[in-house]
Amino acid sequence: MAFAHNSLSQEALLDAYRRMATIRQFEERLHEEIKTGEIPGFTHLYCGQEAAAVGVCSHLDDEDMIVSTHRGHGHCIAKGCDVIAMMKEIYGKRDGLCKGRGGSMHIADTKIGMLGANGIVGAGAPQAVGAAIAAKMDGRRKVAIAFSGDGACNQGTTFEAMNMAVVLKVPAIFVFENNHYSEHTGYSYAVGTSGDIASRAEAFGMKAWRANGSDFFDTYAAFGDLLAHVRGGHGPAAIELDTERFYGHFEGDPQRYRGPGELDRIRAERDCLIAFRQSSGIAADALDSIDAEVAALIDEAVTAARAAPVSEPAHVLEDVYADY
Amino acid sequence: MAIMNIRDAINRTLHDEMERDPNIILLGEDVAGGAGTAGGQESIGGIWGTSGGLIGKFGADRVIDTPISESAIIGAAAGAALAGKRPVAELMFADFIGVCADQIINQIAKFRYMFGGETACPVVVRLIYGAGMNAAAQHSQAFYNLLTSVPGLKVVLPTTPADAKGLLTEALHGQDPVMFFEHKALYTKKGEVPDGPYRIPFGHARMVREGGDVTIVALGRMVSFAEKAADALAAQGIGCDIIDPRTTSPLDEEAILDSVEQTGRLVVVDESPPRCSLARDIIGLVAEQGFTSLKAPPRMVTAPHTPIPFARELERAWLPSPAHIETAVRGVLDWG
Ligand SMILES: Cc1ncc(C[n+]2csc(CCOP(=O)(O)OP(=O)(O)O)c2C)c(N)n1
Ligand SMILES: [Mg+2]
């Protein structure tokens, strides 16, 4: 898709790059820090998919809502979650974004429209429909977005949500990030032979887009068209973003399902940060200095997370209810 | 006898049983793993390592990798069972019964009764459960209490490699649906496993040890916590009976009541929140049928009434511990 870069201001371009670089460095750093054994639980890294989250979220305001997945760090950062509070959460610390009770898979910040990452595959899409019902009631132009993987598109909940969104004509947007794997199973097997994921959305009666989710400009342009459609009151829409995950399904995954040289190839050919440098028209040193600022931020986040206090046993009883 | 861990005991039992009965099929997400990838399907052996080597031996018709579709997995298992097969369906995390609850509680559990007694639906659902890996609120729950409350389901919680073999083999011979709960933190637990065909009838508790002063009924992973507590108490001259019910439906009520008749004191240890738990259920049983044996009010050691938190310190605080069990045992001994 031809994209007029000049439709984005220099400032917006730098901001998009900063968000992608933040996700990348956040995840690369976690990949290292996990080896120290300090980080509890399962961690699913978003590296490789940055252009998808940022290409979508760069269009959004705080009023717009997203629901995310188990691989949610990128969505959180793209939507504007505080990186230091996220890092503390992933370390399970008391002053983490969710008080250390959620961890990597369960980060939320409703104030900025990040309604939650989710450990249950397929749980998010119906929730986005509900948020879209609320958006429609509120009469604003805001939208609700469900990020889902290629694996999640096989859950009945996702089908039900797409159908219901069409029936109710609500501003729900289904973003399918097709990274070609659900855990250790290939997309070509699990999604069957019906064609791509976008065509499933079309079969329910909504308009769907397809874009290169490893390219910021392609995703940004396609999502911009989609958003104009949805904000224009035409009901739900979907987009399938073809992308890659650079690490295992979770940290510790030996990735025996990958082909020879596959990881090197996708790093070489499908790195959205490299692509951005090649096509943004922004001088390399401007991007280099963003990289350096981001590196300092991530350092600060890790240092703060490590130093942050842990919870007391009594904290386990907090917040089960609003009142009881 | 061979020494092996629970993971291998389950794997070998699946090998043996699939060999014995060509109607047994396995289905679930990544039960083989690697479908549609360059690495191929023999590369993984299942997420938990319990299905290693099965696809190579029995083929993709009997070892079925599914899309992420729990309702369809359990529903398909139900249908295959109605059509004469013996499906073993895997829920990678027991928490995912939230996705497919209808197929379990309204379908599989009801067919025999509702359809007049002629319908068999011998599905085995393997549910990987339990806290201890900081997997947080949606990947750590021990939902055996929920399924125990549903008539028509049998519920099994093996705690040793021998029991894993004996109970899984039994499940694959019976005519009823069986919810087979495997604790993720117990997979590496080792023990002796009998060679050759080995079945353990459901509804027979395992007497883990006899001590005479207090009865501890412990469920799942809590059995080993109870043993730790009992070791410490033994050093102080306090003897514990430890009962591992092994199946919560049917429940070996007699073993529990007999022991309480001797000891007069009961502690129940359960890795779930207290309300509507097995701990409450078992204490209710003893209150009703063993009241005159009791010398002190029974005590429960459970998790608190909260979801399971992520942080290490919080999960540790959430989980019952050997120290909690010791305190509870002292409490029932010191009472009155
Ligand atoms: C209901 C449910 N089933 C299974 C899982 C286990 N699981 C976690 S992530 C995942 C794969 C998801 O694949 P996809 O939707 O493509 O997302 P990706 O991991 O590629 O980001 C699976 C099977 C789960 N968390 N929830
Ligand atoms: Mg995927």
Image (tube, coloured by chain):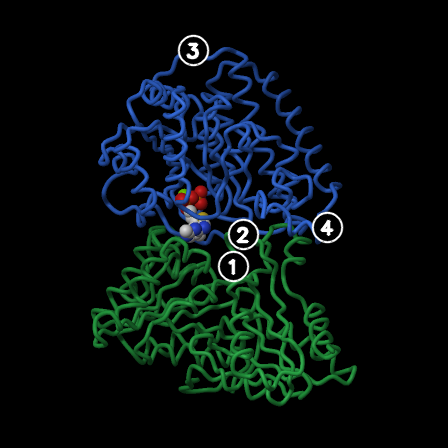
Residue indicated by mark 1: B141
Q: Quadrant of residue B91?
A: bottom left
Nearer to me, A149 or B54 = A149
Structural distance between the alpha carbons of marks 4 and 3: 51 Å
Quick check: A53 above or below B83?
Answer: above
The reply to whether the C-beta atoms of the residues labelled 2 and 4 are less than 8 Å apart is no
Q: Residues within 10 Å of mark 2 (few under 14, many from 20)?
A: many
Q: Nearer the viewer, residue B203 or A182?
A: B203
Q: Position of residue B35 (x, y in %)?
A: 35, 54
Which residue is depicted at the point 26% across and 47% down?
A: A192
Which SS class for mark 1? Answer: loop
Q: Label 2 belongs to which residue? A: B137
Colour of chain B as rendered: green
- The kind of residue on which mark 2 rests is Ala
Q: Residue at x 72, y 71 (%)?
A: B327
Chain A hue? blue
Q: Which residue is mark 3?
A: A7
Q: CA distance from mark 2 to mark 3?
A: 44 Å
